[in-house]
Amino acid sequence: MGMSNLTRLSEFILIGLSSHPEDQKPLFALFLIMYLVTITGNLLIILAIRSDPKLQNPMYFFLSILSFADICYTTVVVPKMLVNFLSETKTISYAECLTQMYFFLVFGNIDSYLLAVMAIDRYVAICNPFHYVTVMNHRRCTLLLAFSVAFSCLHSLLHVLLVNRLTFCASNVIQHFFCDVNPVLKLACSSTFVNEVMAMTEGLASVMAPCICIIISYLRILIAVLNVPSVAGKCKAFSTCSSHLTVVTLFYGSITYVYFQPLSNYTVKDRIATIIYTVLTSMLNPFIYSLRNKDMKRGLEKLISRIKAQMDMLSTAQANKIHEP
């Protein structure tokens, strides 16, 4: 038997968050609730922005795209995890594993670049308000979005193709709840040197570029705000950034902890940290942006009132039909 027979496994086994049978149903219930809250919350954000004319500006345009990306990001991981909680085999095919890895990287990077674009948007709005409409015009917003999506797709394709060239000839048990790059690399019996070099160069650059944009944008904002004479003006400026900063801290804090360390150090703690940026951040985003943003809160209230009014009209119409002779 040659090595060509060992280069492709038919399937992997996802160990999940816990190997104890008694933990599976409680974990299923917990993550099902979190997934439903994530989908519902982000859909409400998208619908509120699309239906309210007062929310038709670049900041909320990018927020609606971020909410859509969060729905996709979570959907790449959670449904398969839910199935595995109730399954005895917990397997994932080789092709399905690489597909999951690809889309996980795509939507994760889109999230990262959208957060950077939103930071730039806040910088222009606070530091250059008179030219905001001109600078953040529809064409420029579309180009920023197109770049974020295109780069994320190419970046993800590169890393998945590098994983696809590896040989797996020992264990097929992935010590994780989805096909993330590092746990899969740990199973390879061929050299992962190229993968690790690319992760610490191109991968690091792709994460640090938006992070640097965010840091520079907020440093410029901080300098501008400190020059505002009134305390009320300073508070108003900071309040427009507080939601975004909270999401950035959660997202980049957990990603830095998980990925910027040697492959040999990858442990069960990293699985827990991964939950923060794959599930928890996506679930909390709608609450963070709606509870700390008056315009968003008002838009959601109007949307919910409209939905309730339509439901009341439907129930009244059905009641009238029932009572018709």
Image (tube, rainbow, N blue to C red):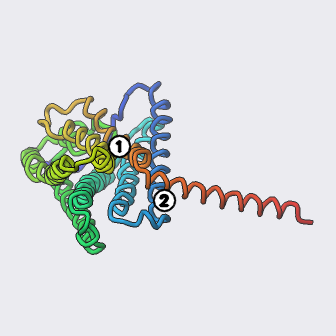
Q: Is residue 145 visible?
A: yes
Residue 324 in percent (x, y) is at: 89, 65
Q: Is residue 163 visible?
A: no
Residue at (71% x, 61% y) in the render: 314
Mark 1, residue position: 281
- Answer with mark 2 or mark 1, whichever residue precedes in sequence: 2
Residue shown at the point (44%, 27%) measured from the top left? 23
- Mark 2 to mark 1 CA distance (whole Å): 20 Å
Badge 1 element? helix
Q: What percent of the width, then of the height, locates residue 189?
A: 14, 41
Rendered image quadrant of residue 261: top left
Which residue ends up furthest to the bottom in the rendered image?
139
x and y percentages locating residue 65 in the rendered image = 36, 60
Q: Nearer the viewer, residue 72 or 84?
A: 72
Rendered-image quadrant of the C terminus = bottom right
Residue 141, located in which quarter of the rendered image? bottom left
Name the residue that disc number 2 marks.
48
Of the pair 14 and 156, the residue shown nearer to us: 156
Which amino acid, mark 1?
Answer: Thr
Q: Tag 1: Cα neighbours inside 10 Å, few (<14), some, or many (≥20)? A: many
Amino acid type of the residue that numbered disc 2 sits on in the rendered structure: Ala
| Residue 165 on image: x %, y % | 15, 53
